[in-house]
């Protein structure tokens, strides 16, 4: 069993934030005690435009490739979908066998068309939700969604005018919103899209991408096939040699795809001395190999409740909670947003997550959406 000690990063954090509460209270006390009604108009508007949950109906389903389908979602509980920035995602709530599962999907439709959102889902061997959506979901089905959320957005103040997009497989989805986003395209000077897939049959949206590219000379597209040699396509991985041909200096680089691709590219960027400030990422979770199918006990402490449920070694803690109808707090489901952040009180876990803050690691916080049990585990979900 691990011995939990507070590490150096956590101690530094404690020093940095020691007076934060006191100073904040001083600032609050300086403010007027009078409440002006007008102050809340903006909050009301935000609530109307971004409600806590939206009821949607599937109006169209398009099979994009053998294992990918697009779903068009029309709002039922509001008139138009909330505005969003290209790169955003929604959390879809899917009820299967009276259990509710939450999964995050990038919006692949244009931010200027808010009558509906399009999300695109790839069928995945063991994925309960992706298989349900691919095999069972039909036109007319209704769901709740949360969001839009996400930081995978282009910011003119921060990002460069020359942009490189790197997509792996279904990682193309957030970039489809960008490619249809006139405001974004007007802000930039050039856009190079590298799009990697196994074969030309696995390239989602190829026809749509080619049509957009042919109408806009700022856009260049390089398709890279890893398992098929074809004229007109690059072959292999999106590697250093291919990237260097496009000159990466002073360009903003957006990566969307499996986590392994992100780590592979990150090594290249480190070697090329590309500063982190130029790199943005949106990653998709991959299930680690060699997980055990043993069943452990997962004890969850939340507010004044303590619940113990079974948790299989090959399922994330969040997955087991969903299966056992325990309320979950999740947005991205891939270990990035921190919304599910919980404290590991006891037990051994395998976590593929490397997007925790250094101090969180020292304090034994984990992201249960990407954490698998290796023994009986106790976690505490901090809710204030
Ligand atoms: S839901 Fe985003 S980190 Fe777990």
Image: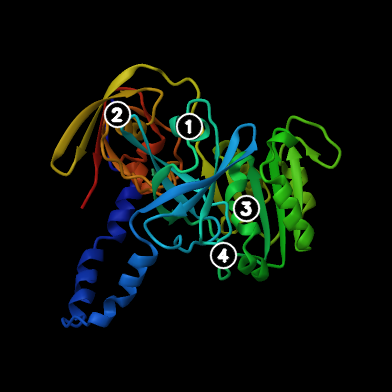
Q: Which colour scheme is used?
A: rainbow
Where does ligand 1 appear, by image quarter?
A: top left
Q: Distance between the residues labelled 3 and 1?
A: 25 Å
User: Which residue position holds label 4?
Assistant: 112
Instruction: Give the labeled residue for mark 2.
Output: 2
Check the picture and name the quadrant holding the N terminus. top left
Q: Give the image quarter of residue 309.
A: top left
Checking the image for residue 176, the label placed there is 3
Q: Nearer the viewer, mark 2 or mark 4?
A: 4
Q: Is mark 1 on a helix, strand or loop?
A: loop
Cα–Cα span, label 2 and label 4: 51 Å
Q: How far apart are marks 1 and 4 (CA)?
A: 30 Å
Task: Please say if the residues under marks 4 and 3 sit with CB atoms less than 8 Å apart.
Answer: no
Tag 3 or tag 4, which sits nearer the N-term? 4
x, y (%) of residue 139? 50, 42
Closer mark to the observer between disc 2 and disc 1: 1
- In the image, 358: left or right of 134? left
Please identify the residue farthest to the right as the structure is shown.
231
Furthest-top residue in view?
294
Residue 258: % across, % down: 57, 38
Q: Which of marks 3 and 1 is in front?
A: 1
**Mark 1 vs 4, N-terminal side:** 4
Give 162 or 180, whichever is nearer the viewer.
180
The local secondary structure at tag 2 comes to loop
The label nearer to you, 4 versus 3, is 4
Mark nearer the N terminus (2 vs 4): 2
Q: Residue at image x 48%, y 26%?
A: 126
């Amino acid at each position: 069993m691990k011995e939990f000690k507070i590490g150096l990063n956590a101690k530094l954090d404690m020093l940095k934030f020691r007076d934060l509460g006191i100073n904040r209270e001083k600032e609050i006390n300086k403010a007027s005690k009078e409440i002006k009604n007008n102050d809340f108009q903006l909050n009301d508007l935000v609530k109307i435009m971004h409600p806590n949950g939206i009821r949607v109906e599937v109006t169209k389903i398009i099979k994009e490739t053998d294992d990918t389908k697009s779903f068009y979602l029309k709002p039922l509980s509001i008139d138009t979908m909330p505005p969003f920035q290209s790169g955003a995602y929604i959390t879809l709530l899917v009820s299967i066998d009276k259990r509710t599962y939450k999964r995050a999907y990038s919006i692949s439709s244009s931010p200027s068309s808010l009558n509906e959102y399009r999300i695109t889902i790839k069928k995945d061997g063991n994925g309960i939700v992706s298989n349900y959506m691919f095999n069972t979901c039909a036109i007319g089905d209704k769901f709740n969604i949360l969001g839009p959320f996400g930081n995978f957005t282009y910011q003119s103040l921060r990002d460069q005018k020359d942009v490189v997009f790197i997509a792996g497989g279904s990682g193309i989805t957030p970039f489809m919103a960008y490619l249809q986003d006139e405001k974004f395209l007007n802000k930039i000077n050039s856009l190079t899209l590298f799009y990697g897939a196994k074969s030309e049959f696995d390239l989602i949206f190829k026809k749509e991408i080619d049509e957009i590219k042919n109408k806009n000379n700022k856009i260049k597209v390089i398709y890279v096939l890893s398992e098929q040699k074809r004229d007109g396509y690059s072959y292999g991985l999106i590697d250093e040699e291919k990237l260097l041909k496009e000159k990466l200096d002073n360009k903003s680089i957006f990566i969307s795809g499996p986590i392994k691709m992100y780590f592979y590219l990150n090594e290249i960027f480190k070697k090329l001395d590309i500063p982190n400030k130029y790199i943005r990422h949106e990653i998709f979770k991959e299930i680690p190999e060699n997980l055990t199918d043993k069943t452990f006990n997962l004890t969850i402490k939340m507010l004044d409740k303590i619940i113990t449920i079974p948790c299989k070694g090959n399922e994330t803690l969040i997955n087991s909670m969903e299966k056992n109808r325990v309320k979950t707090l999740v947005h991205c489901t891939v270990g990035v947003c921190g919304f599910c952040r919980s404290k590991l009180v006891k037990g051994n876990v395998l976590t593929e997550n490397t997007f925790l803050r250094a101090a969180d690691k020292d304090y034994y916080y984990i992201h249960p959406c990407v954490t698998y049990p290796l023994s009986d585990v106790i976690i505490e979900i901090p809710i204030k």
